[in-house]
């Protein structure tokens, strides 16, 4: 806020208000002439800020007519620009902002927004320089202004309170009535005096703009900090989710390993069972051959025994071969296990890579990831449930097979015992034993067929499950790839936004630094100018004092010289008189005394002059 440096007669007024309230006509009534174009209809005639001035009672009054605050054609940004332009039209600044309102229309919340608009455009300090002016005062008739303003707490009452109850009423239909103008000017003068004789300066607007820019910068910085904090939180949550996923994956891998081991053990057992069954079949065939041989060759029992021994040895060899084959299979299984371990290590590496990539995921990925995790958990639970059911079924089947095998073994033992008995009693019970064996063989064949069918079904089920598992794995990989791509795109977008904000912040910071440097240079130049002026003034004062001292010394010298001349004349007269009266000796004595006196006085005067000005030398010659 600046003190008034211009003449006290100058007055600068800015008119503001809605379209159709009579701003232009009020400007015409204030200036006493048709300076601004006015229209009776509620249309915005003033599209740009206009400046007009005239002299009233020896005072130069300037009025700025602005476009409507809520004009139908102009946008709010254009209106703000026009209002800032109006300030530049009446530099160094306006003395008063007049909000023009019409008594012939209803007061709505738009009047409150006009005050907010002035605060946002010029700052809260501008309300100290604001007066409300009501047009169409002829509509009051017999009513008072309080009746038109409404109840306390109404919109217009609040507006007047914000403007410190400064208002005035105009009748634009009677422009010849200059009393209303003079009263308005008095109120403006009183307001200016209350504000310390100041006006609303452009520096206030600059300070307000700086404050706005600083607030915007603070808001941007706060937003950047919030985004950084959110990013940190998201990264922490992502890491936590990744840890959870890793743990779940490890658990799933362990479960898969267990299931694979169980399946391998089951497959081994099945293979062993098949081998035992094959052996049983062979043994049965052998027994049949033996029975037939017993029938055919009862006499050749010894030869059969030898054959049995040879067959036994062969069987032993076969068993040894089988043992060796099993050992080879175990070695192959170990090699497969090592291959499987290498594959697991590769998978672990891939998983670690995926972990590193998953660290870059953001908000949307978390939501989608959570949903996918839920789906995966459901699938895993379903798979676990299915696996449990499958394992239970397999256990049941294995128990059944074991029971069957046990029964078969028992039956084989019984059969062996029977065969032994039959060998001893072949002649008696040979036919009956053959029938029994036929029945047993038929039952066994049926059982073998059922078992083969069950094995085939079991294999098909295992293949289907393997296909489903592979499909689900491929789907999981595809979903992971898609999520990674989406996450990368989102990260790139966020990086671009942050970089744009940083660039804007750096440009604004550079602009501020340049502005501050210019201000500092300007202040330095002003300081140097002021210091130079002060030095010049001090030099001038010293020169003036010196010249005045010299003048006074000259005056004193003139006075002393005149006094000396007078003394000289008086002495000459006295000498002439005494010379006439007395003798020459006495005259000589007196002349010497006068010379000594004159020399002493001259020495005293010269000493005084030397004290006053020691640089100059004054010579007094007495003739």
Image (spheres, grey):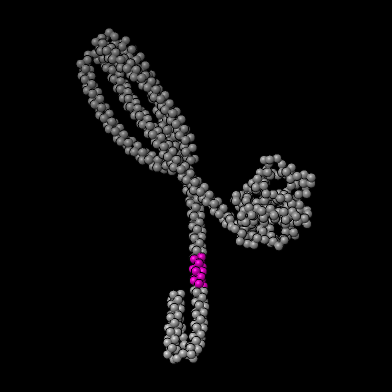
Q: Position of residue 120 (x, y in %)?
A: 60, 50
Which quadrant holds the N terminus?
bottom right
Specify the quadrant of the image occupied by residue 81: bottom right
**359 relative position to 534: left or right:** left
Q: Nearer the viewer, residue 60 or 601?
A: 601
Residue 535 magenta-drawn? yes
Q: Nearer the viewer, residue 151 or 227?
A: 151
Q: Residue at x 61, y 61 (%)?
A: 5
In the depicted structure, whether residue 107 falls above or below residue 526: above
**112 relative position to 464: left or right:** right
Q: Position of residue 275 (x, y in %)?
A: 31, 24
In the depicted structure, whether residue 528 falls above or below residue 382: below
Q: Nearer the viewer, residue 518 or 363?
A: 518
Q: Residue at x 42, y 87 (%)?
A: 589
Question: Is any part of residue 474 visible from this angle?
Answer: no
Q: What are the residue bounds of the magenta stretch?
A: 529-545
Q: Residue at x 45, y 83 (%)?
A: 598
């Amino acid at each position: 806020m600046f003190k008034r440096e211009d003449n006290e007669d100058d007055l600068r007024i800015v008119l503001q208000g809605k379209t159709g309230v009579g701003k232009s006509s009020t400007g015409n009534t204030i200036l006493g002439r048709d300076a601004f174009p006015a229209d009776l209809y509620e249309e915005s005639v003033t599209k740009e800020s206009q400046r007009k001035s005239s002299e009233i009672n020896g005072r130069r009054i300037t009025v700025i007519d602005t476009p409507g605050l809520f004009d139908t054609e102009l946008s709010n940004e254009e209106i703000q620009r026009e209002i800032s332009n109006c300030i530049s039209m009446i530099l160094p600044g306006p003395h008063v902002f007049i909000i023009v309102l019409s008594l012939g229309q209803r007061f709505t919340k738009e009047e409150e927004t006009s005050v907010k608009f002035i605060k946002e455009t010029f700052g809260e300090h501008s309300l100290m320089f604001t007066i409300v002016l009501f047009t169409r005062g002829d509509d009051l008739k017999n009513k008072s202004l309080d009746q038109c303003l409404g109840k306390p707490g109404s919109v217009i009452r609040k507006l007047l309170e914000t403007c410190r109850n400064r208002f005035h009423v105009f009748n634009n239909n009677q422009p010849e009535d200059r009393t209303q103008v003079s009263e308005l000017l008095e109120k403006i003068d009183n307001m200016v005096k209350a504000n310390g004789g100041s006006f609303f300066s452009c520096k206030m607007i600059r300070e307000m703009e700086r404050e706005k820019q600083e607030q915007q910068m603070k808001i941007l910085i706060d937003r950047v900090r919030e985004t950084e904090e959110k990013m940190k939180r998201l990264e922490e949550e992502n890491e936590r989710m990744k840890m959870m996923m890793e743990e779940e994956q490890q658990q799933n891998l362990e479960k898969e390993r267990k299931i694979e081991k169980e399946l391998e053990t089951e497959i081994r057992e099945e293979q062993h069972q098949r081998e035992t069954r094959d052996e049983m079949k062979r043994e049965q065939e052998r027994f049949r051959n033996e029975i037939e041989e017993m029938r055919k060759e009862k006499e050749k029992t010894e030869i059969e025994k030898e054959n049995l021994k040879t067959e036994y040895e062969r069987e032993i060899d076969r068993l040894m071969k089988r043992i060796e084959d099993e050992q080879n299979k175990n070695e192959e299984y170990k090699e497969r296990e090592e291959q499987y371990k290498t594959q697991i290590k590769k998978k672990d590496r891939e998983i670690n890579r995926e972990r590193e990539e998953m660290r870059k995921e953001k908000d949307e990925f978390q939501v989608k990831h959570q949903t996918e995790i839920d789906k995966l958990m459901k699938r895993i639970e379903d798979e676990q449930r299915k696996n449990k059911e499958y394992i239970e079924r397999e256990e049941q089947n294995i128990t059944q097979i074991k029971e069957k095998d046990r029964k078969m073994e028992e039956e084989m033992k019984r059969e062996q015992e029977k065969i032994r008995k039959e060998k001893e009693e072949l002649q008696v019970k040979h036919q009956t034993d053959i029938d029994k064996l036929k029945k047993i063989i038929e039952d066994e064949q049926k059982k073998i067929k059922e078992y083969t069918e069950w094995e085939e079904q079991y294999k098909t089920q295992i293949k289907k499950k393997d296909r489903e598992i592979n499909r689900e794995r491929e789907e999981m990989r595809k979903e992971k790839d898609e999520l990674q791509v989406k996450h990368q795109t989102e990260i790139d977008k966020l990086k671009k936004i942050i970089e744009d904000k940083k660039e804007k912040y750096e440009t604004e910071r550079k602009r501020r630094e340049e502005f501050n440097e210019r201000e500092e240079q300007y202040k330095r130049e002003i300081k140097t100018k002021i210091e130079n002026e002060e030095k010049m003034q001090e030099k001038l004062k010293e020169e003036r004092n010196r010249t005045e001292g010299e003048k006074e010394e000259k005056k004193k010298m003139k006075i002393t010289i005149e006094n000396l001349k007078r003394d000289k004349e008086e002495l000459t007269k006295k000498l002439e008189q005494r010379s006439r009266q007395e003798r020459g000796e006495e005259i000589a004595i007196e002349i010497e005394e006068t010379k000594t006196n004159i020399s002493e006085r001259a020495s005293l005067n010269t000493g005084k002059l030397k004290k006053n000005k020691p640089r100059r030398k004054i010579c007094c010659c007495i003739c």
